[in-house]
């Protein structure tokens, strides 16, 4: 992390918590953040609930004027019409969302989300005035072959190649090695840094240094309060996308606190 970028701790709740549980979590979380005098100017926090909880999350956050941001976990590439079960970017934006996760490895695996579809999701999110959190990262097989950096950089390039500089500057990239997601196996700080640096260098080469230095690059994959400090100390790691640990309010509070403290 560098002082140029404000770190982001984003909780990806995946398919957990109904709207009552989501509301209860946010109330506890807000209370715990206040108890530790959390400074939202030094570290941004975002939560990504299921679609069905977005409205309740909005109400919980807005009614108490909390500084927590929130967003969705996926989005339709079309704006409206006969697409049963889909949710458009405008619908998400109208609920006050700041972010949408795009291209998470679980979406790429369980849904027909290829690069072309992910490009369209990124465009839809940007057009609705939100920021995409673009997930990339190698599988165990690619890592075994030693091509993990090229693979992650290639995934970012495939999605960003047609974006303008202005659009690219709004991206957030989450480097999430697939083998680390939900497994308890975390990338070493050095390998998270190597991937973040490689992605940043490539963005700088394509869109200019200003864009490259603006884009926040998160690490995701078995982040916990035990490994967060070492990871966030790396100069190109600007925060976290967190699954399992974001479901436990004390653990998420600890990670937020450690990330905030690393900014001073
Ligand atoms: P994890 O999930 O923290 O449970 O590994 C991360 C993610 O899938 O974004």
Image (cartoon, rainbow, N blue to C red):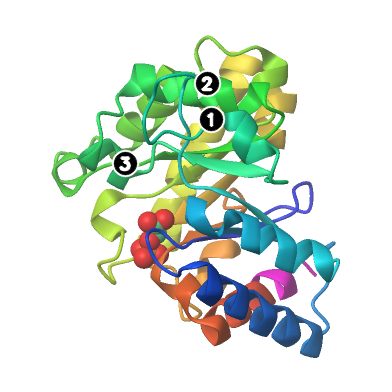
Q: Is mark 1 on a helix, strand or loop?
A: loop
Query: Residue 71 placed where, x, y %?
Result: 60, 49
CA distance for labels 3 and 2: 21 Å
Is residue 243 positioned above or below 175 on the image? below
**Relative vertical location of residue 255 with respect to residue 143 in this rendering, above or below:** below
Tell me the mark number nearer the camera, choosing from 1 and 2: 2
Query: Of the residues under marks 1 and 2, which one precedes in the sequence?
Result: 2
x, y percent for residue 5: 75, 48
- Quarter of the figure that contains the C terminus: bottom right
> Residue at image x 72%, y 68%?
60
Neighbourhood count class around disc 2 (C-alpha, 10 Å): few under 14, some 14–19, many 20 upward? few
C-beta proximity under 8 Å, tags 1 and 2: yes
Q: Which quadrant: the N terminus?
A: bottom right
Q: Mark 3 points at which residue?
A: 107
Region of the chain picked out in magenta, as a range: 259-264
Is residue 261 covered in magenta?
Answer: yes
Q: Which of marks 3 and 2 is in front?
A: 2
Residue 67 visible somewhere in the drawing: no
Q: Residue at x 79, y 77 (%)?
A: 38
Q: Which of marks 1 and 3 is nearer the N terminus?
A: 1
| Position in image of residue 137 (x %, y %) | 34, 42
């Amino acid at each position: 992390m560098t002082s140029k970028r404000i770190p982001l701790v984003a909780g990806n709740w995946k398919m957990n918590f109904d709207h009552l549980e989501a509301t209860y979590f946010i109330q506890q979380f807000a209370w715990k953040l206040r108890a530790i005098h959390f400074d939202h100017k030094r570290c941004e926090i975002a939560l990504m609930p299921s679609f069905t909880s977005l409205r309740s999350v909005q109400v919980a956050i807005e009614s108490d004027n909390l500084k927590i941001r929130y967003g969705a976990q996926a989005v339709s590439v079309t704006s409206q019409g006969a697409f049963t079960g889909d949710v458009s970017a405008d619908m998400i934006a109208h609920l006050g969302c700041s972010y949408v996760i795009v291209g998470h490895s679980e979406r790429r695996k369980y849904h027909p989300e290829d690069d072309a579809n992910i490009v369209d999701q990124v465009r839809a999110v940007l057009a609705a005035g939100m920021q995409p959190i673009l997930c990339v990262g190698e599988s165990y097989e690619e890592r075994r072959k030693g091509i993990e950096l090229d693979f992650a950089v290639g995934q970012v390039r495939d999605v960003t190649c047609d974006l303008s500089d202005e659009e690219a500057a709004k991206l957030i990239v989450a480097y999430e090695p697939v083998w680390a997601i939900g497994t308890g196996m975390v990338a070493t700080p050095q390998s998270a840094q190597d991937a973040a640096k490689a992605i940043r260098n490539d963005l700088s080469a394509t869109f200019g240094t200003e864009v490259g230095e603006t884009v926040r690059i998160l690490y995701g994959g078995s982040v916990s309060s035990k490994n967060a400090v070492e990871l966030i100390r790396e100069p190109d790691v600007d925060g976290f996308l967190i699954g399992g640990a974001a479901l436990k309010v004390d653990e998420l509070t600890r990670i937020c606190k450690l990330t905030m403290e690393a900014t001073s």
